[in-house]
Amino acid sequence: MSFLWTTEELITHLVGRPFGTLPEGITGISIDSRSIAPGEAFFAIKGDRVDGHDYASIAVANGAALLIVSEAKLPALGRITVPMIVVEDVLAALQKLGLAARDRSHAKIIAVTGSVGKTTTKEMLRRVLEPSGRVHAAVASFNNHWGVPVTLARMPADTDYGVFEIGMNHADEIRPLVKMVRPHVAVITTIAPAHLGNFADLEEIAAAKAEIFEGIEPGGHALLNRDNSQFEYLERAAQAAGVEHIHSFGQHAKAEFRLAEFDGSAESSVVWAVIGGETREIAIGAPGRHLAENAMAALGAASLCGADLTSAIEALGHLSAVKGRGQRHRLALDTGSYVLIDESYNANPASMRAAIAVLASSVPTGEGRRIAVLGDMLEMGAFSKDVHSELAGPLLAAGIEHVWLAGPEMAALRDALPDSVQVEYLEKTEDLAAFAVRAVRPGDVVMVKSSLGIGFGKIVAALLDKHAPFTDTERQI
């Protein structure tokens, strides 16, 4: 059997002591007792809300081969007979294992940060690098103080390309994470007013994102969005950090990975890009100019890592949007169907505008409507009322005449929209979900977007639960 880590390696790198009869090795690492697979090690991390030690017995029942537990918690686990490695602090031990994984790796490492598009760009990189070698990338949005070490520790020794997402909502959060990851290429997708309540202005956000430069390997590369207002600031920051190679992507004439033309439809896009002085036509299997911009970042990073660019471009044609980030569903309703666009994972002013643009490009059928279902953008602080009310502009410019809202902050947008827009406002997400199920009609295109904490995934779930996937039987004949 091929092990991710042998038990001997685990004991050494975790600086732990064995308890019980340990297996020869483990096949994976989990911090979630519900999804752990047989043969994996369960790290009982103590988080802000839950303590993994409280779920150790569930992890054992689900097949955990080994538990990594804290010395202080050991007495409370007396009845559990599964093998354990006992450490002083479980999260610190996981970080040590992540560092060991990075030290043993010969992979090209890419780190992605930015106010918008981190996870999408990471998933694009996973797709475009696969034709060139074995890719290891973060699952979901594992981009914080536990997600990054988990992703590192899970990286197999024979990985060719490692892709890591690094997030933050305060200064000094990226710095320790990027020094663990030590990327050969660091990408900043863009700087936008996300987590604005924790910063004075965009330059402070840029400064926090610029911490990523401090971990770039000697001789490595920074890849920046040349269309962003903070490009020059980031370029200077990269130079000050000693980054030897600074590159750019975007529509700007001087961008090395340049988006020359964009042709978008409701389901996909075609881009003409100039890379290395050559113009290439690129099909992207998902809609939105913002995805085309992310694709330029992904292709740029892949190129800088030496991946095959032709295969990478071809792979973009097979791309599809993921759950919570633009995934589309055609659902049956009465004698017809409607389209649900799931953008429910997160939101800030920039991603709201991008999602509204995607809705604007979607064409309702029959008597259908374009409907924006919007919830609060969190962590906007003193700027919250302004950034919510300012969404009226892009909604009106896009011709969106039906807007369904929930959340206390969205009251500002309700008040900013003119009478020409049909607005439905409910304070609670659950109430809006019930309304949406009742009010949706055949031919509609419904786009759902909010910050994760508002829980608009419940609206998506309610619609998916109520309406089955649409099957066009006529086309099957």
Image (cartoon, helix red, strand yellow):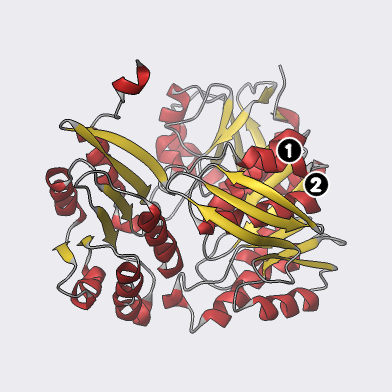
Task: Kindly tell me whether residue 67 is visible in this rendering.
Answer: no
Above or below, comparing residue 342 to residue 243 in the picture: above
Pointers 2 and 1 in contact (CB under 8 A)? no
Q: Which mark is residue 159?
A: none
Disc 2, SS: helix
Identify the residue shown where x is 58% and y is 36%: 318
Foreground: disc 2 or disc 1: 1
Q: Quadrant of the C terminus?
A: top left
- Using the image as rendered, state which of residue 151 and residue 54 is in the foreground: 151
Q: Residues within 10 Å of mark 2 (few under 14, many from 20)?
A: few
- 299 left or right of 217 in image: left
On the picture, is 16 further left or further right than 415?
A: right
Give how far across and how far down residue 360 sits, in percent: 36, 58
Give the residue displayed 58% in from the left and 49% down from the top.
270
Q: Marks 2/1: CA distance?
A: 29 Å
Q: Give above or below for 404 relative to 396.
A: above
**Which label belongs to residue 311?**
1
Give the mark nearer the N terminus: 2 vs 1: 2
Label 1 neighbourhood size at 10 Å, few (<14), some (14-19), many (20+)? some
**Labels in figure, total:** 2
Residue 101 visible (yes or no) = yes
Q: Is residue 81 above or below residue 298?
A: above
Q: Which residue carries the number 2 mark?
A: 103
Q: Give the percent coordinates (x, y) of residue 16.
A: 67, 40
Residue in the image at 53% along x and 80% along y: 202
- Residue in the foreground of this view, choosing between 149 and 162: 162
Side (left or right) of 395 relative to 287: left
Task: Please provide percent x and percent y for residue 98.
Answer: 68, 46
Amino acid type at image mark 1: Ser
Kindly identify the residue that appears in the image at 46 percent across and 29 percent down: 59
